[in-house]
Image (tube, helix red, strand yellow):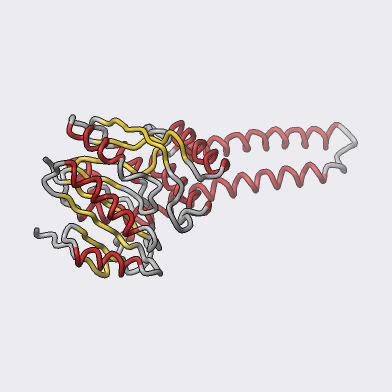
Amino acid sequence: MAKVSIVAPVFNEEENIRVLYDKLCDVLQPLTIDDFEIIFINDGSTDSSIQIIKSLAAQDEKVKFIDFSRNFGHQNAVFAGLENCKGEAIVIIDTDLQDPPEVIAGMYDKFRLGFDVVYAKRLDRKGESWHKLLTAKFFYLFINKLSDTPIPLNTGDFRLISKRVNQIVCTMPERNKFLRGQIAWTGFQQTFVEYNRLPRFKGETKYPYAKMFKFAFDGISAFSNIPLKIATWLGFFTATVATGLFLWTFYVRLFTNNYVQGWSSMMIVMLFLGGVQLICIGILGEYLGRVLDNVKGRPPFIIKDTNINKKE
């Protein structure tokens, strides 16, 4: 049987780490897998997460850890695990226990049938507010309309990928990671297993709305240039409207006596054009900012400490 790697990013999850470890062991040991490893990536936690992880590693050689020098973000933490894992099958799972480890057994069965990507599709998302569910649904519908790479609906990063898919993903140089899109982009045989997502076991969510919106824009900008095209067409539209208003103003000035009036309409036009220009400049700025991040060539994360020996 293939070796399985579990990649689990951690950010202030001291109450959940041991529970996740126990559940993963309970799930993986009966699968008659030759070997498995559990890689915890500590993404700059300020609680005792790294101490708990190191204590698990001291008692179980299957537990590996990567400790970042600071917080580099969830996607970079997952990417660090993908770069350092050794499994033929790699499972990405969060540490908050909303995604039940028991689902991994079904994923592994699909992998043994020859599928390179097995993503977990949510039937139900307990413990989440209606507005979060609505924004998530809107995001996936929106990005699938804009992108040439379809992103499966009702899925997150919880999935199993094969070694060859992982090798391709790890060669992608972009700094603003959107791994669920990058994995979908690789193609290969993909399928899903369905499950009910649970409420967070303990602690508070590490993904407030500000991070969610940034993540959403990272995904859109990484897989679509349509916002740039929208900005272009919006510029043509406003130029056409402005030309029409200019001709109308010219006509009023020459052929009517109402040319003194119109201060309100002038201000509306100025504000409208100014707003559109700022929107277009903002869109361009977001794309240029991502280009600048890649041009700088800085590493996506810095590892302060690890027990992973790449020569193994």
Of 148 and 47, the residue lying toward us: 47
Q: Quadrant of the N terminus?
A: top left
Which residue shows up at 44% across the image and 51% down it? Answer: 200
- Hey, which quadrant is residue 122 in on the image? top left
Tell me which residue sits at (30%, 42%) in the image: 102
* Left or right: residue 203 compared with residue 74: right
Q: Position of residue 127 (x, y in %)?
A: 51, 45
Side of 285 where 85 appears, left or right? left
* Percent position of residue 256, x then y: 88, 33
**Can see residue 293?**
yes
Percent across and percent down for residue 275 are 64, 47
**Which one is nearer the viewer's eye here, 253 or 119?**
119
Q: Could one spot residue 298 in this view of the protein?
A: no
Quarter of image, res 280: top right
Residue at 54% across, 38% down:
134
The tally of labels here is: 0
| Viewer-side residue, 14 vs 245 | 14
